[in-house]
Image: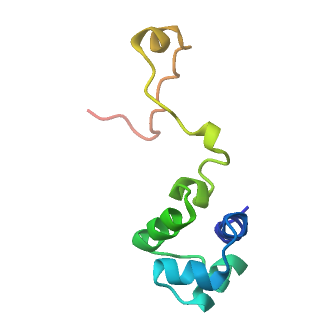
Amino acid sequence: MHLGERVKQRREAIGWTQTQLAQAIGMSQHRISEVELGKRQQMSFDRLRSLALALGVSADWLLGTWDEIAEAPTEAPTAEEDAAAPPRPAPRRRGGRQRA
C-alpha cells in the first residue's frame, strides 16, 4: 500500500473529506487528491509531519515503515532481555583489497 492509499484510508476512517484535510494542513484539495491517487510521490518532511498529525497517525505508518501500530517498538529491551536474545551476526565486511 502506498502513501496515497494510506492517506485516503485514514481520512475516510475519521470521516473527513479531502477539503477538510486540506484545510487542516494548509494544502489545496487538488494536492490531497494527487497524493491519494499516487500522482504526487514526493513530499517535504514538514508536510508529511503535518499530514500525519492531522490524521492522527505516525509518519512511519503513512510511509509504510510499520504496517500496524503493534509492530512499533515500545521501549528498549532490558539488559536481561538483551542478553537472552540470540546473538546478532557480525556486520559484513566490505570486499576489495586489504588495507595496510
Picture quarter with the N terminus: bottom right
Where residue 91 sits: x, y (%)?
46, 30
Residue in the foreground of this view, choosing between 20 and 26: 20
Please give the count of numbered marks on the rendered protein. Answer: 0
Q: Is residue 55 left or right of residue 36?
A: left
Q: Residue at x 40, y 39 (%)?
A: 97
The answer to whether 95 is drawn above or below residue 54 in the figure is above
Snapshot colouring: rainbow
Where residue 82 sits: x, y (%)?
46, 15
Q: Is residue 77 left or right of residue 5?
A: left
Most extreme residue toward the front is 15
Most extreme residue toward the left is 100
Q: Residue 17's image quarter?
A: bottom right
Where residue 38 sits: x, y (%)?
69, 78
Q: Residue at x 59, y 60 (%)?
A: 63
The answer to whether 65 is drawn above or below residue 2 in the figure is above
Picture quarter with the C terminus: top left
Q: Is residue 36 left or right of residue 82?
A: right
Q: Residue at x 63, y 79 (%)?
A: 35
Where residue 59 sits: x, y (%)?
52, 58
Q: Residue at x 52, y 15 (%)?
A: 87
Residue in the foreground of this view, choosing between 55 and 83: 55
